[in-house]
Image (cartoon, grey):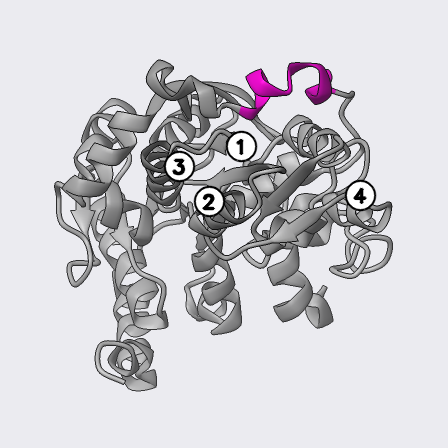
Amino acid sequence: MKYVDEYRDPAAARRLAGAIRALVTRPWTIMEICGGQTHSLLRHGIDQMLPEGVTLLHGPGCPVCVTAAEVIDQAIALAATPGVILCSFGDMLRVPGETGSLLAAKARGADVRMVYSPLDAVALARAQPEREVVFLAVGFETTAPASAMAVLAAAEAGLQNFSLLVAHVLVPPAIAALLAAPDNRVQGFLAAGHVCTVMGYNEYGPIARRYGVPIVVTGFEPVDLLQGILSCLRQLEAGRAEVENAYGRSVRAGGNAPAQAALRQVFAVVPRIWRGMGEIPASGLDLAPAYARFDARARFRSAVGTPASAGPCISGEILRGRSRPTACPAFGTGCTPEHPLGATMVSSEGACAAYYRYRRAAA
């Protein structure tokens, strides 16, 4: 397949791995910020192709995983509200909050439905005007434009029974928060190619300069990842800290202007609580005042409740790159994809799910 098979070429991957081994003169620690990249790294054994001194850490790059338990509990409360249809992506149904999961709520009789797009939820609201349809809007900058388009479509159609429970998060503030932590070990970042396809990469420059770390925009195939790692290591070995685009076939510096315009129109930047990381300033999106009528929290204020106390899951340590999934005593025993204790085991992009699938035998 054009532009895919070329980036899965074993010979090219071996050449890049050899170049990495020839280049490295000292230990380095790099973090990939995307859960899809984490899975690809483990699936193809790329982490095992690297020199011993090169350490890969897995960051908070799974939007399902970083969605706060409070949001899941709010969604469950909304789903239990008479007359409400709660719509979400498939992974979100199994993510645990403090009061269970949406899948458990569905088993108790709540009307919870899996959709493939927020526009599916708009269509449902149009088809069932007697019901309130709430879409749980999660994801990074990659999926936020679709949520914005859903709000614009609902506004154009004059829908009174559609709303969003917004939990969108932004990547650059999370990178800055990780680098500002006193126990930070990350010396370079692989930035998520799909996020940068939407947003570009100009906003990463100030972060690279402030913290002295290279940030390389990277794709998802084996050759993409090895090229991104090689580019990052070249900067580290040379003492440089710049933003570099190693995913040129998809990413441009300015990103996707129409998508960004939709985000600016519909959303405002707000602080956001990340599961396992706490509140990060200016790291989330919420509805702008002009579209506040589509805010499910305001529409169902009495149903959303208050945050519950944190549970015992160590996914926060995993999301910050401080621990690996195999360090958890419940990994693969008390916590499995069939019976997850935390979001990092639920999501198809979660680090725990990746280790369970690709590294469990070696654990």
Q: Point out the tag, 1 or 3, that comes first from the N-terminus.
A: 3
Label drawn at residue 122 = 2
Q: How far across and down, in percent of the image, does residue 117 sit? A: 46, 52
**What residue appears at the point 33 percent right and 79 percent down from the top-left corner?**
8
Separation (CA) of disc 1 from disc 3: 9 Å
**What residue appears at the point 72 percent right and 46 percent down from the top-left corner?**
111
Q: Is residue 200 visible?
A: no
At mark 4, the secondary structure is helix
The residue under label 1 is 161
Separation (CA) of disc 1 from disc 2: 9 Å
Q: Point out the tag, 1 or 2, that comes first from the N-terminus.
A: 2
Left/right of residue 103 with respect to residue 189 in the rendered view:
right
Q: Which residue is nearer to you in this view: 207 or 99?
A: 99
In the image, what residue type sits under mark 2? Val
Label drawn at residue 105 = 4
**What residue appears at the point 65 percent right and 59 percent down from the top-left corner?**
353
Separation (CA) of disc 4 from disc 2: 22 Å
Q: Which residue is nearer to you in this view: 215 or 137?
A: 137
The residue sitting at the front extreme is 130
Residue 305 in which image quadrant: top right
At mark 2, the secondary structure is helix
Bounds of the magenta span? 296-307
Label drawn at residue 154 = 3
Q: How far across and down, in percent of the image, does residue 196 sit? A: 26, 46
At mark 1, the secondary structure is loop
Q: Point out the tag, 4 or 2, that comes first from the N-terminus.
A: 4
